[in-house]
């Protein structure tokens, strides 16, 4: 059982994975690589002058891998259901258990519908300010919660917000992910030692 299961490996899903795993929650991502990013070129992502969408995805994947996220590449999730301890995430071959689930499947909203999440009048998944859906401990991010504003930077922010709100719930107080330069030496030095 993992703490957080994330369905979708685009900017929203991988951002959620990065923030959750980096801050101590065991995290799994299910990624079919069916992201719009493969059709994109980013000129409007803060801090990035210009990058091909596919190259951007490789950078994100490397980053979450470096933090130890359990990434199921090519694993399509066929169902997400509530259970006594949280959620069961099913693929064609296996079932996985998680305390929280983050839906990050772009404009594909069928899993949210099957889970029983409420929808807005525009057909987007209805979330509160914390990105939590009407199903407790199920969060939705990115294009699935927005009728029109589909941008990589917005999706990544939604994913980060979902993870931080899960961390807030877990820790019982508002959680902030803020590092100082000395933290980089500590984190990346430990990663280099693991290699």
Image (cartoon, helix red, strand yellow):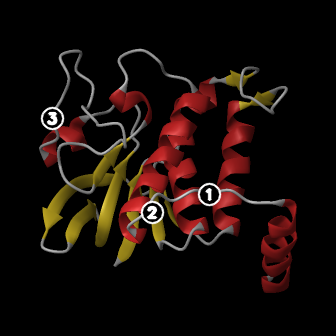
User: x%, y% of residue 3?
Assistant: 38, 71
User: Which label's residue is closer to the chain start, 2 or 3?
Assistant: 3
Q: Which mark is residue 167?
A: 2
Q: Which mark is residue 94?
A: none
Q: Quadrant of the C terminus?
A: bottom right
State the count of labels: 3
The quarter of the picture where the N terminus appears is: bottom left
Checking the image for residue 177, the label placed there is: 1
* Element type at mark 2: helix
Which quadrant of the figure has residue 141?
A: top left
Q: Tags 1 and 3 in contact by the CB under 8 Å rule? A: no
Foreground of the two, 129 or 155: 129
Badge nearest the viewer, 2 or 3 = 2
Contact between marks 2 and 1 (CB within 8 A): the answer is yes
As helix, strand or loop, the secondary structure at mark 1 comes to loop
Q: Left or right: 99 with respect to 181?
A: left
Report how far apart the C-alphas of labels 2 and 1 lie in the structure: 10 Å
Query: Residue at left 57%, top 56%?
Result: 176
Alpha carbons under labels 2 and 3: distance apart: 23 Å
In this rendering, the label closer to the viewer, 1 or 3 = 1
Q: Residues within 10 Å of mark 1 (few under 14, many from 20)?
A: few
Q: Image height check: is 78 above or below 94?
A: above
The quadrant in which residue 157 appears is top right
Residue 69 versus residue 117 in the image, above or below: below
170 relative to 115, above or below: below
Tell me what residue is drawn at x 37 percent, y 51 percent. 102
> Which structural element holds mark 3?
loop
How far apart, in angstroms, are the residues tagged by discs 1 and 3? 29 Å
Residue 161 x %, y % = 48, 45
- Numbered circle sitting on residue 118: 3
Q: Which residue is most to the front?
A: 173
């Amino acid at each position: 059982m993992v703490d957080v299961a994330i369905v979708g490996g685009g900017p929203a899903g991988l951002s959620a994975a990065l923030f959750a795993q980096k801050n101590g929650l065991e995290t799994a991502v299910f990624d079919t690589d069916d992201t719009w990013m493969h059709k994109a070129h980013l000129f409007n992502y803060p801090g990035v002058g210009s990058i091909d969408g596919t190259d951007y995805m490789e950078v994100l994947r490397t980053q979450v891998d470096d933090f130890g996220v359990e990434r199921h590449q090519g694993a399509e999730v066929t169902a997400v259901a509530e259970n006594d301890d949280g959620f069961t995430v099913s693929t064609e071959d296996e079932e996985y258990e998680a305390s929280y689930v983050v839906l990050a499947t772009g404009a594909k909203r069928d899993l949210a519908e099957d889970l029983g999440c409420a929808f807005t009048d525009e057909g987007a998944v209805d979330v509160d300010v914390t990105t939590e859906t009407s199903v407790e401990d199920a969060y939705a991010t990115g294009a699935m919660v927005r009728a029109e504003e589909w941008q990589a930077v917005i999706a990544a922010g939604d994913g980060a917000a979902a993870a931080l709100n899960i961390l807030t719930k877990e820790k019982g107080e508002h959680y902030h992910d803020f590092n100082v330069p000395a933290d980089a030496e500590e984190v990346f030095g430990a990663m280099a030692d693991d290699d």
